[in-house]
Image: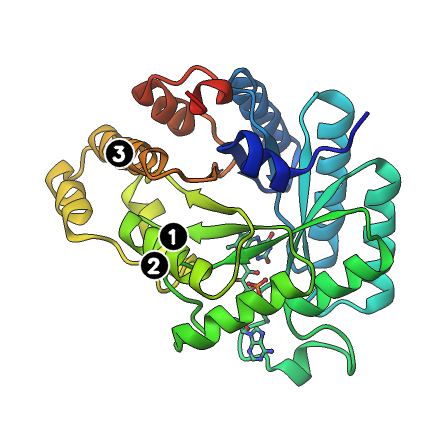
Amino acid sequence: MQPMRIADLARNSGPTLSFEFFPPADESGSETLFESIAALDPLHPSFVSVTHGAGGSSRDRTRAVVQRIRTSTPLCVLPHLTCVGQSCAEIDRVVADYATQGVESILCLRGDRPANGTATEAEPKGEFRFAAELVARVRATHPSLEVGVAGYPEGHPETPNTLLQMEHLKAKVDAGADFVISQLFFDNRAFLDWRDRCRLAGVTQPLIAGIMPITSVAGLRRMAQLAAGTRFPAPLLRSVARAGVDPDAVRRVGIHWASEQCRDLLDHGVEGLHFYTLNRSDATRRVFESLGIASSASLRG
Ligand SMILES: Cc1cc2nc3c(=O)[nH]c(=O)nc-3n(C[C@H](O)[C@H](O)[C@H](O)COP(=O)(O)OP(=O)(O)OC[C@H]3O[C@@H](n4cnc5c(N)ncnc54)[C@H](O)[C@@H]3O)c2cc1C
């Protein structure tokens, strides 16, 4: 069988549709995750991705979830891999393990440094400092693996200079990245402007848009913390405020906003839509219902 190349899919028969999951901490979380995967399967995602935590046990959970999805479903899986605080030998072992399992693509990330950590404190001397170095390592050790990286339409908190930030993204694609998945955003203008700036900078790889439907006020606050720098447009915040204390109304607002974002991105020829699902299926399914899309094949219509 030909390997599944996400970049080729996005370029030649996109837009791709993908769902991001995190490795659950316990058995009940695992049940929820696999119920969500089953509920989203009829949408025929191009791939699903599994996040990778900074701690040791959480890293093992990523590998276990990747393996279970691969053996129990027909889905293509994109494991995330972070390099912060990991030795080169550890990284080589994980990548070799994925390659042996038959994984074809990996999302190469630096990961967040521990609070107050600096480059020299967080990593053993001489090991990875930035994602570009991880990309280069995976390319060198496993040239046949496809590599994705993260992009930040609204900038990354550590690099307020957007020109410099673009140079850092370019360094990742020059090191061999095949596609880019964006941080979540709520203002499409930010994504479309970033896409233009990527093309001007010579980043020609597919740019997959990160979408997260808001499902609660608490979730919105958490997102504001996790994706620091993300702007929340005033019309979105006004709608959430109008929904007040009614959780169903807040949810409807979030789903409506994400649906409108997706419709507009599709109209603007987006190469892929990547949903941050938080291991739940309902909001994502409702977005697709409201778009009138029954499966990823209809995205191409
Ligand atoms: C799609 C997506 C998936 C993610 N998945 C995970 C996950 O599974 N697990 C997890 O822990 N985190 C995840 N993250 C969060 C990510 O790890 C953090 O945002 C992290 O702070 C940066 O990772 P990066 O790969 O973008 O790093 P990099 O590309 O290395 O960039 C990190 C910062 O360093 C700067 N920089 C890069 N190169 C240089 C240089 N040569 N000199 C100076 N500065 C430089 C960049 O501008 C940026 O500010 C994800 C983010 C996205 C968008």
Residue at figure coordinates x 86%, y 58% from the top left: 141
The residue that disc 1 covers is 223
Distance from label 3 to label 2 (Cα)? 18 Å
In this view, the mark in front (1 or 3): 3
The kind of residue on which mark 3 rests is Glu
- Ligand 1 is located in which of the four quadrants? bottom right
SS at badge 1: helix
Q: Quadrant of the C terminus?
A: top left
Residue at figure coordinates x 57%, y 19% from the top left: 41
Residue 28: percent from the left, percent from the top? 60, 30
Is residue 227 positioned above or below 100 on the image?
Answer: below
Residue 263: percent from the left, percent from the top? 31, 31
The answer, for residue 292, to whether it is visible in the render is: yes
Residue 55 placement, left or right of 92: left
Q: Quadrant of residue 93?
A: bottom right
Q: Quadrant of residue 219?
A: top left
**Which dot marks residue 230?**
2
Contact between marks 3 and 2 (CB within 8 A): the answer is no
Ranked by sequence position, the earlier of labels 3 and 2 is 2
Residue 82 placement, left or right of 263: right
Is residue 70 positioned above or below 78 on the image?
Answer: above
Distance from label 2 to label 1 (Cα)? 9 Å
The kind of residue on which mark 2 rests is Thr
In this view, the mark in front (3 or 2): 3
**Which dot marks residue 260?**
3
Residue 224: percent from the left, percent from the top? 35, 57
The kind of residue on which mark 1 rests is Met
Residue at figure coordinates x 59%, y 79% from the top left: 117
Contact between marks 1 and 3 (CB within 8 A): the answer is no
Ranked by sequence position, the earlier of labels 2 and 1 is 1
Contact between marks 2 and 1 (CB within 8 A): the answer is yes
